[in-house]
Image (cartoon, rainbow, N blue to C red):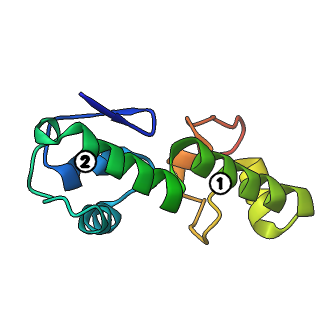
């Protein structure tokens, strides 16, 4: 099993396996394969150690992935909450922040239903 950016990649096509790394999608994976001059249709276990090292170096130097990406996203959310903007307040309250309705739906952000007593007359 190949290990890149702290992730064990499954034995699939290179461009598919790279998407298991947080921060790398299909288009980024195709671009990485092109820059490293690796056929995206080859299996991960068929790659030589030099090719794996080339992939590692390319991802490490040019892409923000896994821990660094998570840290940056969390800092961005914390900044929104600290300055008290609308999006930050919605994050703080655990409500949807992109204009979705909350009277119905929004269960993913709001969590399990909490029944309110005395609502009906």
Where is residue 96? Give x, y as percent: 62, 59
Residue 108 position, x and y percent, is: 51, 46
Q: In which quarter of the image is the N terminus?
A: top left
Front position in the image: 89 or 116 = 89
- The mark found on residue 51 in the picture is 2
Please tell me whether residue 58 is drawn above or below residue 119 in the rendered image: below
Q: Residue at x 58, y 41 (%)?
A: 67
Q: Give the CA separation, mark 2 to mark 1.
A: 30 Å
Q: In this view, does 6 lie to the left or right of 8?
A: right
Which residue does the image show at 32% across and 62% down from the upper left?
32
Q: Residue at x 9, y 56 (%)?
A: 41
Q: In this view, does 5 lie to the left or right of 18?
A: right
Residue 63 in sight here: no
Nearer the viewer's eye, disc 2 or disc 1? 2
Looking at this view, name the residue that lies furthest to the right.
83
For label 1, count other residues whose C-alpha is less than 10 Å away and answer few (under 14), some (14-19) or many (20+). few
Task: Find residue 73 and name its label.
Answer: 1
Q: Compare residues 7 and 57 and report the one nearer the observer.
A: 57
In the rendered image, residue 7, in percent from the top left (x then y), is placed at 39, 34
Residue 86 occupies quadrant:
bottom right
Question: Which residue, as the protein is rendered here, is positioned at the far top?
Answer: 1
Q: Quadrant of residue 81?
A: bottom right
Q: Which residue is drawn at 49% across and 51% down?
A: 60
Direction front: furthest residue: 50
């Amino acid at each position: 099993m190949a290990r890149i950016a702290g992730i064990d990649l499954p034995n699939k096509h290179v461009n598919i396996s790279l998407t298991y790394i947080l921060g790398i999608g299909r288009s980024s994976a195709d671009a990485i394969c092109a820059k490293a001059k690796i056929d995206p249709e080859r299996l991960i276990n068929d790659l030589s150690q030099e090719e794996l090292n080339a992939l590692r170096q390319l991802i490490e130097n040019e892409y923000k992935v896994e821990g660094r990406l998570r840290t940056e996203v969390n800092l961005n959310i914390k900044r929104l909450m600290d300055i008290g903007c609308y999006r930050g307040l919605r994050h703080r309250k655990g409500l949807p922040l992109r204009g979705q309705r909350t009277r119905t739906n929004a269960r993913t952000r709001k969590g399990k239903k909490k029944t309110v007593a005395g609502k009906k007359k």
